[in-house]
Amino acid sequence: MFVTLEGPEGSGKTSQGEALAATLSKRIPLVLTREPGGTEFGERVRDTLLSFGAPPLDPLTQLLLLSAARAQHVREVLRPALADQRNVLCIRYSDSSRAYQGGGDGLPEASVEAAIAIATDGLEPDLTILLDLDPIEGLRRRASAGTEGAQEGWNRFDARELAFHERVRTAYLQLARKWPERVVTVNAARPFDIVRAEILEIVLSRLAVDTTGGTP
Ligand code: TYD
């Protein structure tokens, strides 16, 4: 099964992803990975996109860079793991491009979908957990060190204006309405352990369906 974790800044994707992976990997073969990243090339793209020292990039350039990293990730990590009957938990994937490059930066949906189609070659998650959070709360978490969601430090996307983050959130919620079977929204404003338990329950119930042949 291919599961993705999505959500705005500070929603706890990284900490929740690690907690979920620690629990799941005791029961099933699991690969935990992330975007941008997951391959050596992807981590380099991540540095270029996120660091304040890198040159400013046009939104279309960002979409294409993220898509190049995704193409490598799909071919080098995701497809081989799934072909090997392992499960994959990926922190951010195509929905991040829809929400950030599409919703946040306003790139045309057709361009975003074309880039996703080329990069993923049709590889869609079976389940996406959307950690929903008000951007004001998310950015507050990111800014205060030592709280969940703050581990990776402040990056170039975090530094964008509040309206950008509001558009990202709105776009994510639209995706959840568009694909209710795939995208499950979880209220990430609640305490970490409550959110963790809910995510685990959702994933385990899907896994049960998956392993009994309910989904292809
Ligand atoms: P990351 O630190 O992983 O996210 P978070 O701040 O939520 O912990 O940073 C990754 C950044 O990359 C994040 O701000 C969103 C951005 N991004 C896109 O804009 N489009 C994409 O397709 C992906 C995968 C990430």
Image (cartoon, rainbow, N blue to C red):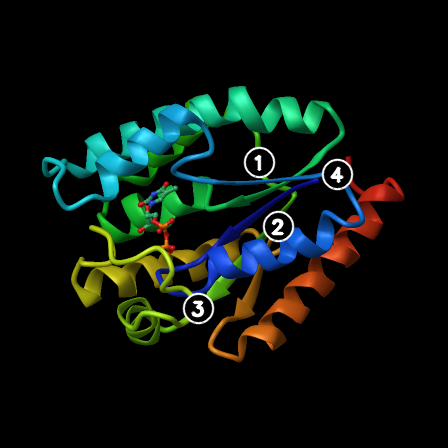
Disc 2 vs disc 1: Cβ atoms closer than 8 Å?
yes
Position in image of residue 50 (x %, y %): 24, 44
Which numbered disc flags the more N-terminal residue, 1 or 4? 4
Q: Nearer the viewer, mark 1 or mark 4?
A: 4
Residue 107: give its label. none
Earlier-in-chain disc, 1 versus 3: 1
Q: Would you say the beta carbon of the disc 1 residue lies within 8 angstroms of ligand 1?
A: no
In the image, what residue occupies the spot 28% across and 28% down? Answer: 64
Pointer 3 or 4: first along the chain: 4
Q: Secondary structure at mark 3?
A: loop
Viewport quadrant of the N terminus? top right
**What type is the residue that disc 4 sits on?**
Pro
Q: Residue at x 26, y 69 (%)?
A: 143
- Decide which of tag 4 and tag 2 comes sooner along the chain: 4
* Residue at numbered disc 1: 124
Residue bearing the label numbered 3: 148
Tag nearer the camera, 2 or 3: 3
* Image: 29 above or below 69: below
In this figure, which residue is indicated by the disc labeled 2? 182
Specify whether 136 is left or right of 122: left
Pointers 2 and 3 in contact (CB under 8 A)?
A: no
Query: Residue 29 got which mark?
Result: 4
**144 or 58, nearer to the observer:** 144
Q: From this viewpoint, is residue 172 visible? A: yes
Q: Is mark 2 within 8 Å of ligand 1?
A: no
Q: CA distance from mark 2 to mark 1?
A: 9 Å
Q: Amino acid at mark 3?
A: Glu
